[in-house]
Image (cartoon, grey):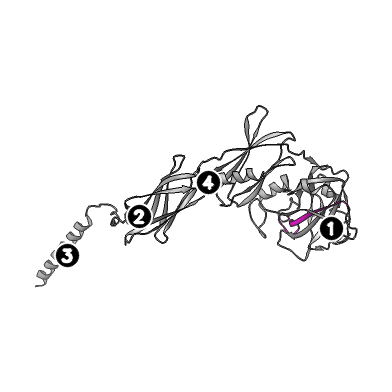
Amino acid sequence: MKSYFSKNKIAFISIISLLLLTLGCKEDIGITVNRVGEKPAPVSNVQVTPISGGAVIRYDLPLSEDLRYVKAVYQLDNGLKREAKASIYKNEITVDGFGKEGVFGVELYSVAVGEVASEAVAVQVNVLTPPHQVVLNKIRANNNVIATFGGLNLNYVNETESDIVIKIIRRDSLGKWQPVESEYTNFPSGTIRIRGQKAVPTDFGVFIEDRWNHNSDTFNVNLTPIEEVTIPTTRWARFALPGDAGVRASGFPFNGIWDGNTNAGYLSIANANTTESIELPNSLTIDLGVQASISRMQIWATRYSTLSDIYGPAHLYEFEIYGSNSPNANGSWDESWTRLGQFTSSRPTGFGFGVPATSAEQTAIRDNGETYEFPDPTTLGKFRYIRFRNYAMWNGSYEGGSNFFIFELRLFGQL
């Protein structure tokens, strides 16, 4: 009996093994196709709202459990085919990218599971003037290309905050147009400053490009840049006013600000022959020896030989520059001073407080310092005395005692 049951058990196991082997050798047919839904009905009750460079299309969604999204298919005026999609959680879709105003055709589709599309709904959209052309029209209408020291300033308004490139060109001595500057922006407004131009009558052109390769027409203007010179330092001197920072007897003298050495200069203190810091906001005043209109400033407001000093506690972060021809002897910030500009230091890396300087930032500071443009040099007049008013340092301090560096200062403008 024992032998009989053993043989049957062996036979049973053999049969089960054979079945499993057969199932395991089933033909591999790969990944199966996702479920295909039913063809949905098209959208209905379509309404169109024109916008700059496009339109917003609103509609009612069809009743379908398989519906996944709505898409708009259309072609731009430059031949580029576009497709926009909107989820089933909203009942509108935006079509954009048109390079000119006018009426254009759009096809709307309801799309179900498995990419099953409905019949098309043909829609006519009325497109308003596109953003890149609107930006140029505002530049032209408001005469926003202005001659200034060493070049021009271009003020722009980009109300839709569209991605655009503002391009500036110049006609050369042979009458050919040459590129001068291309600046990408999606800011609502701003100023592009062009420098290094000769002080002669020059034809400049401005046009705008959008991200679909549309170009506006060109606004041409003839301007004569104002000659920009380096303000000579031969007559510069400290002009000590009550409340200004002190000067150490040695090591960091005041005239180090203009001695031509960008890695040696002035370090503020509270009083002479001490190492005490002076409370924020603090100040210093320079007598230029001549009256000058200042267009820009190049400054080394740190000691770059030491990484810990760059963007450190003695590196100027937020400050103002004032000008005067007859400053009040009591050092007060009264009407005898005119504010020329308010400035905030920024880092090439975009890093903020407390992050050590990189070697690349050290090289940039060493070679170029930091450059600041004065906003209205042609309207403010000329001044003999300039005064720094420092509000914050690169360690984030806006109050308390703080020393500050000015290792070199170069001013540009007109005498």
Q: Quadrant of residue 217?
A: top right
From the image, which quarter does the C terminus lie in?
top right
Q: Which is closer to the viewer, label 2 or label 4?
A: 4
Residue displayed at 63% across by 43% down: 140
Q: What is the CA distance from the residue labelled 2 to the residue labelled 4?
A: 28 Å
Q: What is the CA distance from the residue labelled 4 to the residue labelled 1?
A: 47 Å
Is residue 315 highlighted in magenta?
yes
Q: What is the CA distance from the residue labelled 3 to the residue labelled 2?
A: 56 Å
Q: Is residue 399 visible?
A: yes
The residue carrying mark 3 is: 13
Magenta region: 309-325
The residue carrying mark 4 is: 130
Is residue 294 highlighted in magenta?
no
Q: Quadrant of residue 62?
A: bottom left
Q: Give the image location of residue 186, x and y in percent.
A: 58, 50
Q: Along the line of sight, which residue is nearer the eye, 330 or 259? A: 330
Question: Compared to 152, does 332 lie above or below?
Answer: below
Task: Identify the mark nearer the N-term, 1 or 2.
Answer: 2
Q: Give the image location of residue 359, x and y in percent.
A: 66, 50
Q: What is the CA distance from the residue labelled 3 to the residue labelled 1?
A: 106 Å
The residue carrying mark 2 is: 110
The residue carrying mark 1 is: 335
Left or right, 112 with reference to 171 = left
Question: Which mark identifies residue 224?
Answer: none
Question: In this view, which residue lies farthest toward the bottom?
Answer: 1
Task: Identify the mark nearer the N-term, 3 or 4.
Answer: 3
Indicate the amino acid at tag 1.
Glu
Secondary structure of the residue carrying numbered label 3: helix
Q: Pointer 1: residues within 10 angstroms few (<14), some, or many (20+)? A: few
Secondary structure of the residue carrying numbered label 2: strand
